[in-house]
Image (tube, rainbow, N blue to C red):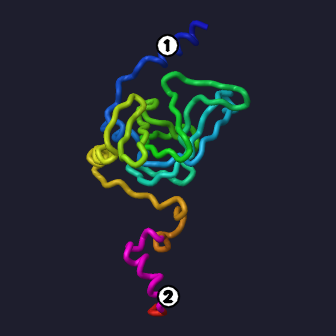
Amino acid sequence: MFVAFLLSALAQQRHRPLSVEELAAASPVSGVAVVERIDTRIDPETRAVYTDAALVFHEIWAGEAAPGFLLTQVGGTQGGRTSAMPGWNYRLVPGERIAVFAVPWKGPYHVVKGMRQGLFHIDAGHGAVRDLDDRRLTLDALRGTVQGVLGKTPVRAAPPEEQGRPPGLRSSSRPESFRWWLPVVGILGLWI
């Protein structure tokens, strides 16, 4: 009982806040993603409940984020069983846009860097981001800081409906004027 209390107290202590520069330098995967779905599961070894968020990345700042990228956290509710880990809790909603700094964990799973410090919610339409400690900045400022640390330009990922298609077949690989003009040429029968 005392050990459980001690572990809980230690987990609740606030850790030294990580700067965006530290998050960028220490996170093998980072970028802007949309939460596709949320699932919960019970780990067969530990019997702990985990909440998994499937993410679709639209910008990749560092590393690789294949379709089916899973961000996991200890805690959740499954089959009438609820668990939580103080200091690690955050809530994601399907359709929500986030900026995330993640590190690999067990198997296909990744966790947020710095317990939850590497998770930024992006306000719809405003380009403002905030972390769970209510630290606020713009998405452009966050992106620029990461670019300065990593020394490279963020890569824009293909839209989800085009992921897996060869680059030459992606509609986004055509200039905007070409996409507009092609149907007009086809209708007029001027296709060469």
Q: CA distance from mark 2 to mark 1?
A: 70 Å
Q: Secondary structure at mark 1?
A: helix
- How far across and how far down the image is residue 93, in percent? 55, 40
- How far across and how far down the image is residue 66, in percent? 52, 53
Question: Does residue 184 belong to the magenta stretch?
Answer: yes
- How far across and how far down the image is residue 65, in percent? 48, 51
Q: Residue at x 42, y 77 (%)?
A: 180
> Against 125, is 169 above or below?
below
Magenta stretch, main secondary structure class: helix
Q: Nearer the viewer, mark 2 or mark 1?
A: 2
> Against 59, is 94 above or below?
above
Q: Is residue 28 visible?
A: no
> Against 2, is 189 above or below?
below
Q: Residue at x 56, y 42 (%)?
A: 53
Is mark 2 in CB contact (under 8 Å) with mark 1? no
Q: Residue at x 53, y 38 (%)?
A: 92
Q: Residue at x 37, y 46 (%)?
A: 126
Amino acid of disc 1: Ala
**Which label was assigned to residue 187?**
2
Specify the quadrant of the image occupied by residue 51: top right
The residue sitting at the right extreme is 79
Question: Does residue 132 belong to the magenta stretch?
Answer: no
**Which label was assigned to residue 9?**
1
Query: Foreground: 92 or 41?
Result: 92
**Span shown in magenta:** 171-188
Q: Is residue 95 left or right of residue 154?
A: right
**Which label was assigned to residue 143?**
none
